[in-house]
Image: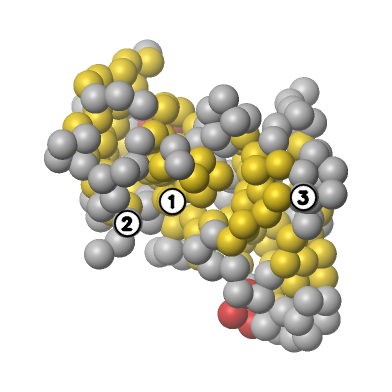
Amino acid sequence: QKEVEQNSGPLSVPEGAIASLNCTYSDRVSQSFFWYRQYSGKSPELIMSIYSNGDKEDGRFTAQLNKASQYVSLLIRDSQPSDSATYLCAVIIHTNAGKSTFGDGTTLTVKP
Amino acid sequence: EAQVTQNPRYLITVTGKKLTVTCSQNMNHEYMSWYRQDPGLGLRQIYYSMNVEVTDKGDVPEGYKVSRKEKRNFPLILESPSPNQTSLYFCASSSPAAPGEQYFGPGTRLTVT
């Protein structure tokens, strides 16, 4: 089992819809969770971080964390064509904060 | 402007010819990492450093070396590159206050023939 698994894509949603991206992790010691967006041919950029159970909202983005279920998700409301990208989930463990583990990514396409 | 720079951006080389990819950041970050990205395999961490003279192996360190003699620089060394090291490489940095909130460089596309 991979340490960080993301729902296989690609994911396609119509403009204005809600896109839901999911990530599960295997290590219960994982404590910090991150969502990065990567446009084709570009480097990853951080869009959300979440450190405690519950929801965290930032504009059209909401990250949800459920440590009991070892599950973190990213919701994108009112999806726009500019949201079309690959979304990477990452986790770290505070006892070894330099080590990051990424999922394989989910490619999202928002169709006008 | 806060940034992570990498050089070169593109490199084609031959098997066995030593090469170095440089990485520099201007944010005074203690944490720096190297990743490789291959189709379908996501980002895999090669090495990371949590401070000057402190480095540790990531998930795929074989065939790579790093050094951290200055806070701002974290070069990646391939002493004898092989074709299976053909990949897209990213350097990243972050603060110990938020180690997972990484800033990535633009990437280096390496081809080893």
* Real-space CA distance between mark 3 and mark 1, rounded to the nearest whole angstrom: 23 Å
Which chain does the residue under circle 3 lie in? B
* Real-space CA distance between mark 2 and mark 3, rounded to the nearest whole angstrom: 28 Å
Amino acid tagged 2: Glu
Give the number of the disc on residue A101.
1
Q: On the image, numbered disc 3 is attached to which residue?
A: B53
Asked whether B71 or B110 is in front, the reply is B71
Q: On the image, numbered disc 2 is attached to which residue?
A: A3
Residue B46 place in picture, x, y as percent: 59, 61
For label 1, count other residues whose C-alpha is less than 10 Å away and answer few (under 14), some (14-19) or many (20+).
Answer: many
Q: Is residue A26 above or below residue A23?
A: below
Which chain does the residue under circle 2 lie in? A
Whichever of labels 1 and 2 marks the residue nearer the N terminus, that label is 2
For label 3, count other residues whose C-alpha is less than 10 Å away and answer few (under 14), some (14-19) or many (20+).
Answer: few
Asked whether B92 or A97 is in front, the reply is A97
Q: Is residue B94 above or below residue A38?
A: above
Left or right of B16 in this view: A87: left
